[in-house]
Amino acid sequence: MGDRCNIVMKQEGKEGYVFFYGHWSGSDFVHAVQRALKKKWRWDDAAYLARIIWDEFCLERGQETGFGIATRLIDNEHDLCVIDVEKKLVTRCKENTSSRSGRDCDIGASVQSWSFDDFINLTQYQIDKMEW
């Protein structure tokens, strides 16, 4: 059981991604991204922005379980929240559901994208209504 979710940070100038995994965070992970971006800190610095998002996402410190960081999708029950710092975009994407063996990417089709500015102006109701 869980409420598994992933925030995905696109690496600057590269094909790779960093996945922030939350085992029980599916009801809050998109709000965590919004809280982090609303600070308007380090929008041009992927490393710092990743840490700022992580700080909002992983509010429980010092625990053995509950959160993780990986270079691939570990487990998931929601659409992915993909952050592209270079383009200043937040994109809701489906998980790539093709066979896990041999696939190139865990990120599937894009559902919708927002600029950072548009994303921070979404209401809580609008985010919840999307049913990530």
Image (spheres, rainbow, N blue to C red):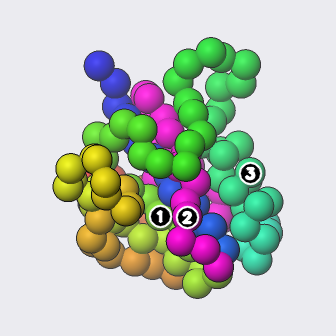
Magenta-span inclusion, residue 35: yes
* Mark 1: amino acid: Val
Report the span colored magenta: 13-39
Element type at marker 3? helix
State the CA–CA distance, disc 1 to disc 3. Answer: 15 Å
Quadrant where the N terminus sits is top left
* Mark 2: amino acid: Gly
Q: Name the spot of residue 45 as percent of width and height, x first.
A: 78, 71
Q: Mark 2 — residue?
A: 16
Of the image marks 1 and 3, the number of the one nearer the N terminus:
3
Say which of 40 and 73 sits in front.
73
Element type at marker 1? strand
Q: Name the spot of residue 37 as percent of width and height, x first.
A: 64, 64
Front tag of 2 and 3:
2
Q: Mark 1 — residue?
A: 82
Of the image marks 1 and 2, the number of the one nearer the N terminus:
2
